[in-house]
Image: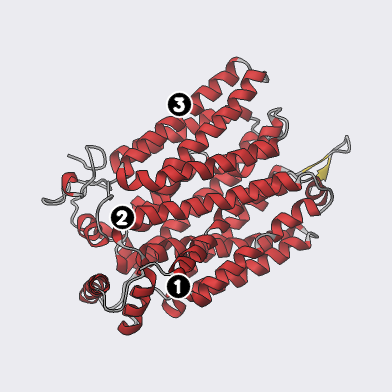
Amino acid sequence: MHSPRRYLMFAVTLGSGSLIGFESGYLNGVLASDDFIHRYGRCDAKGNYSLSPTTRSLFTSMLIAGALIGCCSAPLLQKSYGFRGRFILGSISLAIGIALQLIGKFEVVFILGRVLEGYTLGIISTTVPSYLIETVPSTSRGLIIGLYEQVVTVGLVTASGGNYGLSYLSGSKQWRIEVAIQFAHAILLMIAGVSNPESPRHLAKLGNHTAARTSLGQLRGLAADSPELDEAVAEVHIWLLDDTQQQQEARFRECFEGPHLRRLVLGCSMGFHAESTGIVFFLSYSTTFLAAAGITNAYLITFIIGLVMSASTLPSIYCLDHLGRRSCAFIGGTIMLIVCIVTGAIHSAAPQSAASQHALIAGSLLFIFAYASSWGSLAWLVITEAYSSRLRTYQSTISMCSYWISQWIFGFITPYMVDESAGNLGVNMMYVLAGFTVLSLVWAYFYLPELSGLTQAEVDRFLSSLRSSGFGFDSPPPGDSPDNGGGCGGKGGCEE
């Protein structure tokens, strides 16, 4: 049943996730704004203002501190307020954080605003994907997470386009308008919290089965008396029965026991490798990095990078479910590796030349294309789908903490590696990214399982029944072979 309200609910939920992409891009231009640099930078002997690596690192990485707090508070908020309460709290925190950043007086105030914005990001990153996974059919997991990543990249394009357009303004308007745009995300979060149905599984766990059925019907667009709704409700009841039989209450320490630990390591390592390949570098520092490399109109190039990332996310919507998780990881990672090596080699052979600059631009765009069409969406999907329903809140929280810590690490050290006043790697940073990409490909070969085509219940059974060698995955049990839609999908990911 095609319901306008249903489409609106998903549009609002997905739209709230665009904050993650917008945050990745807006600070890029803010840090390059002349007015911002004069406010928070330091003046050298020649009278030129610049932001120190420490200031840039703090402004970038302190957001992660807030994100970690938001992630860690998610389980407590889920028990007391459900998904809707988390949306509302995120909206309030974001609005206050934006206001503090707009004050533009003292570093500590701007940093506090970034922490509060990060708190909202932490809530969103654990709430929106889990909410979407729980409220769509199992066969649509790849599709809905692909759409989610698409919306994230739309946020990035909006930020990059805003940076480019506002770069022609002067004074504080150059960066304050960009910050203020985020009030739209706060509004979207509030709408989601007020109007969206609560998660059917959360309602069922509370014993409110009538409300759970109504919520499921609204989210799936199913009539109250349809057989499809009966089947969906039965799936929720099976999950609830399994939860009750195992224990009355999920315990945090279970995340670190038996097969649950392997799932947790899978999600945490997925987040780390997705960040380590260099996406933080390209999204957070591309404007200043490209300008330092001698490229004119770095704002425009950064905007084009955002457009490429958004357009390149579209293939992942199809590929994740049809080509499989592992194939996407290998194809995308191989292209990223080749791009990094070739770009670095051209620079080494002809530094500061027109060929080097053109190679850097082309390499950046190809890297973003490969990442967005593979690892970008794959990370969110694996972090969300690999966990059992009863421990998903805890394990998603831990995995997202790992994801944000990884982003903080790479966001904090990048200025020290690239800036002329510190490591001064410049374009040689591409070799570093190539090394991390190799590690990610090795990890994917030995550890990433193939879960495409499996329902959530089949994912639970498959990952719970695995025999482990260390943290690796053994062969799928009989009946869950790759040909039957299960298993690891190949030699890699399933130790023979």
Task: Tell me the element at label 2.
Answer: helix
Foreground pick, 373 / 496: 373
Q: Please indicate whether residue 208 sits to the left or right of residue 74 in the image.
A: left
For badge 2, the amino acid type reads: Arg
Task: Tell me the element at label 3.
Answer: helix
| Residue 471 picture location, percent across and down | 28, 48
First in residue order: circle 3 vs circle 1:
1
Distance in Å between CA atoms under marks 3 and 2: 30 Å
Q: Which mark is residue 263?
A: 2
| Residue 130 picture location, percent across and down | 40, 63
Residue drawn at (23%, 42%), measured in percent from left and top? 489
C-beta proximity under 8 Å, tags 3 and 1: no
- The residue to which callout 3 is attached is 338
For badge 1, the amino acid type reads: Phe
For badge 3, the amino acid type reads: Ile
Distance in Å between CA atoms under marks 3 and 1: 42 Å
Foreground pick, 230 / 183: 230
First in residue order: circle 1 vs circle 2:
1
Q: Please indicate whether residue 160 sits to the left or right of residue 123 in the image.
A: right
| Residue 52 picture location, percent across and down | 73, 43
Q: How is the image coloured?
A: secondary structure
Q: Which mark is residue 195?
A: none
Foreground pick, 136 / 239: 136
Res. 455 image quadrant: bottom left
**How many other residues sit within 10 Å of disc 2, few (<14), some (14-19) or many (≥20)?**
many
Task: Tell me the element at label 1.
Answer: helix
Residue drawn at (54%, 47%), measured in percent from left and top? 409
- The residue to which callout 1 is attached is 83
